Image (spheres, rainbow, N blue to C red):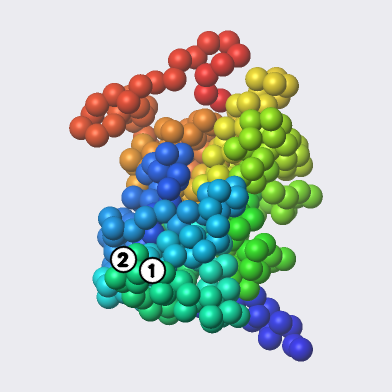
């Protein structure tokens, strides 16, 4: 097998247009501006047809992975999602959540190998809802979509991942969610060995990617690790291991494509400061979603992107990129209403 054909096996087909969008259950609680930014980038900046359907529901992934729901229930809920897509006249399914993306991949793989199970789920869905569905022509994660159009975003961009004070590329750490390519490697760009979905964005927008020993280590979320309070030390210890490994390389930011990973790597930095008195980086390391990073490149206001909701302040990164922002509006919500500001006192407050 040639080098080219071997690398080709790590590529992924991603649809060009007409996307049915499935939001995440928990993502809007962590980073509330990211999903809205994705819709704006696709429709307004790139001119794509994407449907944000209010009728879709949870994929039930958290309950499934926490052993609360049987797989048959999850498959039926996924079938309903596909029915919503079919009824709306779309064929390309896009998931905002990494866990959901893993769920859709698992369901479709199950049906491929066990068609009798698909027939059973079709019957269950029809009995429950009188709905039918078509299998999506293409299933992608939202980070796949941003990756596919990364060059178009660069061309329309007004900012680069370059330190305006030194002229040097900003150093980014990319963190890939486990459910993106570790469960079904063929479903992710680059597979589990060479995932390029986030690295490709960083490089296309002028930055450089930090390679460090624990680059592929899990953040430690692992639903049952966190849902059970006594297990949370395992979660934070995994993030600590990653932060200790990347810190000597002095990254300017961390980019993640999983809502849980983004939240934990961001908030565990505050936790570790309280536990050990350690701050990684000069003032901690900002953690961004790929929509937020794309939005900054395109010139979106950081507060409209919801970046004030991060535990680690993003201003050091904004200053390096030369992005103008109004500090007085950081904690303003819709119509200028104040959303509340974290109090600061020694040993506490935001990083």
Q: Secondary structure at mark 2?
A: helix
Q: Position of residue 296 (x, y in %)?
A: 42, 48
Q: Residue at x 49, y 14 (%)?
A: 344
Q: Secondary structure at mark 1?
A: helix
Task: Report the front residue among 199 and 13.
Answer: 13
Query: For residue 319, which numbered disc appears in the image?
Result: none
Q: Residue at x 69, y 49 (%)?
A: 218
Kindly check if marks 1 and 2 are in contact, taking CB atoms under 8 A apart as contact. yes
Image: 241 above or below 17: above
Task: Report the front residue among 6 and 20.
Answer: 20
Q: Position of residue 286 (x, y in %)?
A: 56, 37
- Residue on which the image places disc 1: 125
Task: Residue at the far bottom: name it.
Answer: 1
- Residue on which the image places disc 2: 129
Q: Is residue 297 visible?
A: no
Q: CA distance from mark 1 to mark 2?
A: 6 Å
Q: Position of residue 131 (x, y in %)?
A: 31, 71
Task: Residue at the far top: name it.
Answer: 346
In the figure, residue 327 lies in which quadrant?
A: top left
Quadrant showing the N terminus: bottom right
Q: Is residue 187 visible?
A: yes
Image: 83 above or below 175: below
Relative to 235, 318 lies left or right: left
């Amino acid at each position: 097998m040639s080098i080219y054909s071997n690398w080709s096996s790590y590529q992924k087909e991603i649809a060009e247009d007409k996307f049915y969008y499935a939001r995440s259950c928990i993502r809007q609680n962590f980073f509330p501006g990211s999903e809205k930014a994705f819709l704006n980038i696709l429709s307004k900046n790139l001119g794509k047809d994407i449907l944000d359907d209010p009728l879709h529901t949870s994929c039930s992934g958290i309950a499934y992975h926490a052993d609360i729901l049987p797989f048959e229930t999850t498959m039926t809920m996924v079938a309903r999602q596909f029915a919503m897509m079919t009824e709306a006249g779309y064929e390309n399914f896009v998931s905002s959540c990494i866990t959901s993306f893993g769920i859709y991949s698992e369901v479709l793989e199950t049906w491929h190998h066990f068609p009798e199970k698909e027939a059973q789920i079709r019957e269950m869905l029809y009995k429950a809802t009188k709905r039918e569905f078509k299998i999506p022509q293409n299933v992608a994660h939202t980070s796949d979509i941003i990756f596919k159009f990364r060059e178009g975003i660069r061309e329309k961009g007004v900012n680069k991942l370059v330190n305006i004070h030194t002229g040097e590329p900003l150093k980014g750490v990319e963190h890939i969610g486990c459910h993106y390519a570790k469960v079904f490697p063929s479903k992710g760009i680059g597979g589990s060995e060479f995932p390029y979905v986030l690295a490709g964005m960083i490089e296309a927008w002028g930055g450089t990617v930090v390679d460090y020993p624990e680059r592929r280590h899990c953040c430690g979320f692992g639903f049952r690790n966190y849902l059970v309070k006594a297990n949370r030390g395992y979660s934070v210890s995994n993030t600590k291991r990653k932060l200790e490994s990347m810190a000597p390389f002095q990254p300017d930011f961390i980019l993640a494509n999983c809502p849980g990973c983004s939240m934990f790597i961001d908030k565990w930095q505050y936790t570790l400061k309280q536990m050990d008195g350690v701050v990684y980086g000069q003032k901690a390391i900002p953690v961004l979603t790929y929509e937020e990073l794309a939005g900054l490149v395109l010139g979106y206001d950081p507060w409209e992107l919801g970046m004030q909701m991060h535990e680690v302040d993003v201003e050091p990164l904004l200053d390096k990129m030369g992005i103008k922002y109004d500090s007085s509006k950081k904690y303003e919500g819709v119509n200028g209403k104040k959303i509340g500001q974290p109090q600061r006192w020694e040993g506490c407050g935001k990083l």
